[in-house]
Amino acid sequence: MKVKVIITGATGLVGEGVLFECLQHPDVAQVLIVTRKPYKGVKHTKLKELIVPDFFKLDAIKDQLGNYDACFYCAGISSNGMNEADYAHITYDTTLSFANQLLTINPDMVFSHISGAHTDGTEKSKIMWARVKGKAENALIRLPFKKVYNFRPGFMKSTPGQQNVKGYYKVIGSMYPLFKLLFPNSVTTMAEVGQAMINSILKGYPKPILEVKDIKVLANA
């Protein structure tokens, strides 16, 4: 089974890490990165790029988004310094708008979404970002895609060669072996996240929300 995937967020840590795994995987035939700014990283014969300044307006490029088997939605932003309205606009409004537009084009696709550890599915948390991410997860699960998966990775070790890794993350990454020893259910690698997302198409998973333990299981399925 050869699959074609759309990836958002390739100019960030998670999206680029997932992209690396897709380009190396023999069952991924084509990757389309949908991004607001050009991706200046790895080049590959499988890779196509589509610059989309506004994720709320896909009508003009619908013909370029058709016939894909999955979307790996890895775009996102830190909540640091943001108020709830601005954070929700990016984390909830933009994500749901993009997903709903894709649904009209590829209703049989798998939609796999990067959320975050400690996201609150009850939407009642006192922690703003956890509440907003929970609202986004729940809304996505209700959409009638073939399947919807919400991935909740914790700390992720980047893949060698990634360019979109912030300085502080490089420092923390050197501590991955210690974190893995002390907090095995809170840390993973970008390679595992990417492999798990690919397997969400090829093999599926019985749960719509995947914690770190689930991600590792699916990555090695």
Image (cartoon, grey):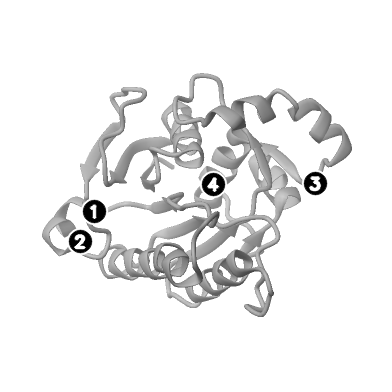
Single out the residue that lies furthest toward the right.
Answer: 182
Single out the residue that lies furthest toward the front.
Answer: 81
Q: Is residue 159 left or right of residue 34?
A: right
Residue wearing tag 2: 58
Compared with residue 181, is residue 141 higher up or lower down, i.e. above or below?
Answer: below
Q: CA distance from mark 4 to mark 3?
A: 18 Å
Q: Position of residue 161 (x, y in %)?
A: 49, 19
Q: Quadrant of residue 135?
A: bottom right
Mark 3 or 1 closer to N-term? 1
Residue wearing tag 3: 185
Mark 2 or 4 closer to N-term? 2
**Which of the pair 127/175 is nearer the observer?**
127
Mark 4 or 3 closer to N-term? 3
Q: Is disc 1 in contact with disc 2, using a CB cutoff of under 8 Å?
A: yes
Q: CA distance from mark 1 to mark 2?
A: 9 Å
Q: Secondary structure at mark 1?
A: loop
